[in-house]
Image (cartoon, rainbow, N blue to C red):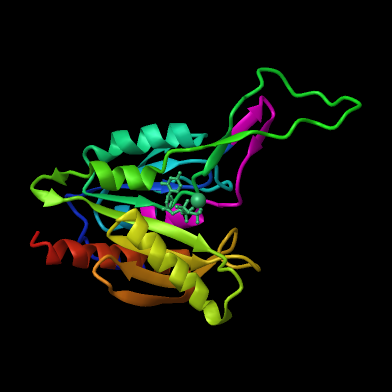
Amino acid sequence: ARPDALPRDLEGLHVVVSAGGTREPLDPVRWLGNRSSGKQGYALARTAAQRGARVTLVSAHTQALPEPAGVEVVHVGTAAQLREAVHLAAESADVVVMAAAVADFRPVDRADFKIKKSDRDPDPIALTRNPDVLAELVETRRGVAGSRQVIVGFAAETGSGGPDGADVLDLARAKLARKGCDLLVVNAVGEGKAFETEDNAGWLLGADGTESPIELGSKAKLATEVWDAVGHLRLRCGD
Ligand code: CTP
Ligand code: CA
């Protein structure tokens, strides 16, 4: 849709979107990372700005993407940096959308100098858990300007081999319950789906039990559906 054809229904709201994939350094030239392109998060930020929101985009590593117009972009590298930036921005946010692929683990040690090879096999890489930013947001959520902050999570699932994606949905339902966020956007990934592609499909799961399919389409279309759902949630909360 043309920006001037979009509703201005997010006017007056501060929304925070995280995007891209974090990188956990092993040494000055190597990292553990993931294949997130950042496209879905950037589409969410762009659409929110077009609909009138003040937008803070906390951007981890992405493909080369243009900065969306009218959006404040905070660049981060590691999960720890993303966590700090998201919590800071969330203090004044009406809505937080965690579209970033945050590393679950980081190396226990980060070498100050490039790790050199030798004649013997390398030591295994010891990993430790990163904090779950989404779970922390739910934990510390507060009302902003008299209304409850809306928190949206993303889940990329490959399933574990079940037919027709049913397995993906089951995993996602359990994840929504575990995370305690208001909405969970579920993408089926793997085999050329979602990561590094232009299109997304999946389900939108609500904490109230609502489940709606997201038909295959552009990441901008998915962004529109997410903001529509956030709008409905805020209306139902009597805002
Ligand atoms: N997330 C987060 N902090 C982390 C890991 C994930 O905030 N350390 C957020 C993601 O941004 C996403 C949601 O949690 O919005 C779900 O991420 P996902 O990786 O699907 O879930 P996990 O709980 O990490 O479970 P798993 O990777 O084992 O499926
Ligand atoms: Ca994870």
Whole-percent x, y for residue 42 in the image: 44, 52
Above/below status of 12 relative to 5: above
Asked if residue 231 lies left or right of residue 130, the reply is left
Range shown magenta? 24-45
**Residue at horizontal 75 percent and vertical 24 percent from the top:** 115
Give the camera-side residue of 139 and 218. 139
Residue 87 left/right relative to 105:
left
Question: Quadrant of the rendered structure where residue 193 is?
Answer: bottom right
User: In what quadrant of the picture does the C terminus appear?
Assistant: bottom left
Q: Above or below — where is 158 with respect to 98? A: below
Residue nearest the observer in this picture, 190 or 120: 120
Q: Which residue occupies the extreme top position in the image?
A: 112
- Relative height, residue 149 to residue 58 (above, below): below
Q: Residue at x 40, y 36 (%)?
A: 83
Where does residue 148 sit, x and y in percent of width and height? 15, 51
Residue drawn at point x = 46 percent, y = 66 percent = 171
Q: Residue furthest right?
A: 119
Q: Is residue 112 left or right of residue 216?
A: right
Whether the magenta-drawn stretch holds residue 217 is answered as no
Q: Can residue 158 be seen in the rendering of this structure? A: yes
Asked if the magenta segment contains residue 35, the reply would be: yes
Q: Residue furthest bottom?
A: 164
Query: Residue 169: x, y in percent?
Result: 45, 72
Q: Residue at x 37, y 56 (%)?
A: 153
Query: In this view of the protein, which residue sits in the foreground, 97 or 186?
Result: 186
Q: How far across and how far down the image is residue 143, in percent? A: 14, 46
